[in-house]
Image (tube, rainbow, N blue to C red):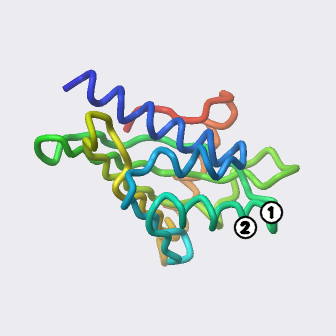
């Protein structure tokens, strides 16, 4: 189980690295053929081709922020299926601080496909914590620590 957790963590790290490098093909390659993404804004991408093509457009048209993340949980859902839950912050190009307006929660479902782990679903949702600004501040502070250490992904609670 420990080895599987490390493999899932590695996939997640490579996913965020691909995003931060603005590399749509590397990002999409981590998904299974029928893998899906539900974006921060509710947009959906289905299949490696759609994921790569959509991200190519996004990267060409926008200066995307880079991710920092803290993994909250990695666990098995059943044989050949794992889930990773993380909180993420984004750092706007030209800035050094985490932007609290776009903090999010990510869930990643990873499955064994043709003898290797592939992402079946990446779901990102805003961590707005409506009516609880102290929770936004606490999460931003937590993610800022990760960013200031120069880390991409921290494993912890």
**Would residue 21 be found to the left or right of residue 135 on screen?**
right
Q: Which residue is mark 2?
A: 57
| C-alpha span from label 2 to label 1 | 5 Å
In the drawing, does residue 103 fall left or right of residue 85? Answer: right
Q: What's the residue at 60%, 52% (across, down)?
A: 89
**Element under label 2?**
helix
Write the residue at 31% across / 47% down. 110
Q: Are marks 2 and 1 in contact (CB under 8 Å)?
A: yes
Q: Looking at this view, name the residue that lies furthest to the top.
A: 3
Residue 74 appears left or right of 126: left
Q: Nearer the viewer, residue 35 or 153?
A: 35
**Residue 23 in picture, x, y percent from top left:** 68, 47
Q: Residue furthest left?
A: 79
What residue sits right under mark 1 in the picture?
60
* x and y percentages locating residue 101 in the rendered image: 65, 67
What residue is shown at x 28% (from left), y 48% (from top)? Answer: 83
| Label 1 neighbour load within 10 Å: few <14, some 14-19, many 20+ | few
For label 2, the crowd category at 10 Å Cα-Cα, with few meaning under 14, some 14 to 19 and many 20 or more, is few
Badge 1 element: helix
Q: Residue at x 64, y 42 (%)?
A: 144
Residue 53 position in % (x across, y down): 63, 64
For the image, the number of numbered tags is 2
Front position in the image: 34 or 4: 34
Residue 79: x %, y % from top left:
11, 41
- In the figure, 108 relative to 131: above or below? above
Q: Quadrant of the N terminus?
A: top left
Relative height, residue 154 to residue 103 (above, below) = above
- Pick the quarter of the image with the C terminus: top left
Depth order, front residue of 109/138: 109
**Residue 74: image tag:** none
Q: Eyeballing the image, is 128 above or below 70?
A: below
């Amino acid at each position: 189980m420990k080895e599987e957790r490390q493999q899932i963590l590695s996939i997640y790290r490579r996913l965020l690295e691909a995003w931060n490098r603005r590399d749509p093909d590397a990002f999409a390659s981590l998904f299974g053929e029928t893998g899906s993404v539900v974006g921060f804004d509710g947009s959906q991408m289905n299949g490696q081709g759609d994921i790569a093509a959509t991200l190519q457009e996004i990267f060409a048209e926008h200066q995307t922020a880079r991710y920092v993340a803290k993994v909250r949980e990695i666990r098995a859902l059943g044989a050949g299926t794992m889930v990773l839950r993380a909180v993420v912050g984004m750092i706007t190009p030209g800035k050094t601080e985490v932007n609290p307006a776009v903090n999010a929660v990510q869930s990643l479902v990873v499955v064994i496909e043709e003898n290797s782990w592939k992402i079946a679903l990446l779901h990102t949702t805003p961590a707005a914590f409506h009516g609880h600004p102290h929770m936004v501040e606490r999460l931003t502070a937590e993610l800022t620590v990760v960013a200031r250490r120069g880390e991409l992904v921290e494993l912890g609670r």
